[in-house]
Image (cartoon, helix red, strand yellow):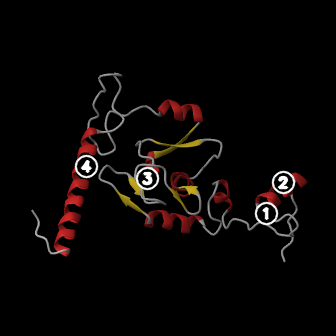
Amino acid sequence: MLSVPLWVDDQARRHFMIAHRCEGLDVAPRPYADPVLSQVNGLSRHFTEDTLRAYLLARSARADNGCLIVRGYGSQRGVHQKLAGRAWAHIAAYVVFVGGYDPTLEVHHDCGAPDCIEPTHLRQLSHADNCRERTQRPRCRNGHEREVEPATGRLRRVCRTCNRLAQKRWRERQAAEVAKARATYGRASS
């Protein structure tokens, strides 16, 4: 059985024991393989910088606009992705690709794509600066011009071109499923 290491204070030890549900146990926390990665919240402890770098690159694909889009947990694209435990992919990418991570600052995407981990698109800002940078961009993530909403005078939140293309792809998938089902049951397509 492992012994508890020397803690800075008794309160830190108590918080650890409560968080890990080991009230009466004599358990030491597993240290990170790399001290730089210990600053990333939720990151799995078995990663080193090299293995995390390889893991992120294996789960990502280069987009036409230069973004390195990562595929994390879940099927939604265009949202912040979690990887490597419960860590945000863009923060882990900033730590291993850019370096000099400051946990008190936020990682901002210059490209506007929250699932992008391209190192040249990431930079650290304070929370106030990050909020100021979050303006609507005149183009959507696929490069289409956004339209102005007549009622508000602001740019539409959803790109109509992307939405129309997505609906078209959905209708084509549905038609293919119906045709397949009809062929299975011996009915001819109409």
Dot 1: few (<14), some (14–19), or many (≥20) neighbours within 10 Å? few
Which numbered disc, 1 or 2, marks the residue that appears first in the sequence?
2
* Label located before the other in sequence (1 or 4): 1
Secondary structure of the residue carrying tag 2 is helix
| Residue ID for mark 2 | 12
Q: Give whichever of discs 4 and 2 has the lower sequence position.
A: 2
- At mark 3, the secondary structure is loop
What's under tag 3, amino acid-wise?
A: Glu
| Image quadrant assignment for residue 21 | bottom right
Q: CA distance from mark 1 to mark 2?
A: 14 Å
- Numbered badge on residue 118: 3
Q: Position of residue 77 (x, y in %)?
A: 40, 53
Kindly identify which residue carries mark 1: 21
| x then y, percent, for residue 88 | 55, 53
Where residue 150 appears, x then y in whole percent?
A: 29, 23
Q: Nearer the viewer, mark 3 or mark 2?
A: 2
User: Real-space Cα distance between discs 1 and 3?
Assistant: 38 Å
Disc 3 packing (10 Å; few <14; some 14–19; many ≥20): many
Looking at the rendered image, the disc whose residue lies closer to the viewer, 3 or 4, is 4
Closer to the chain start, of discs 3 and 2, is 2
Quadrant (top left, top right, bottom left, bottom right) of the C terminus: bottom left
Q: CA distance from mark 3 to mark 4?
A: 29 Å
Identify the residue at image location x=47%, y=34%.
134
Query: Which residue type does callout 4 highlight?
Result: Gln
| Residue positioned 86% across, 56% down in the render | 14
Asked whether disc 4 touches disc 2, contact meaning CB atoms under 8 Å apart, the reply is no
- Contact check, label 1 and label 2, Cβ < 8 Å: no
Q: Does label 1 or label 3 sit earlier along the sequence?
A: 1
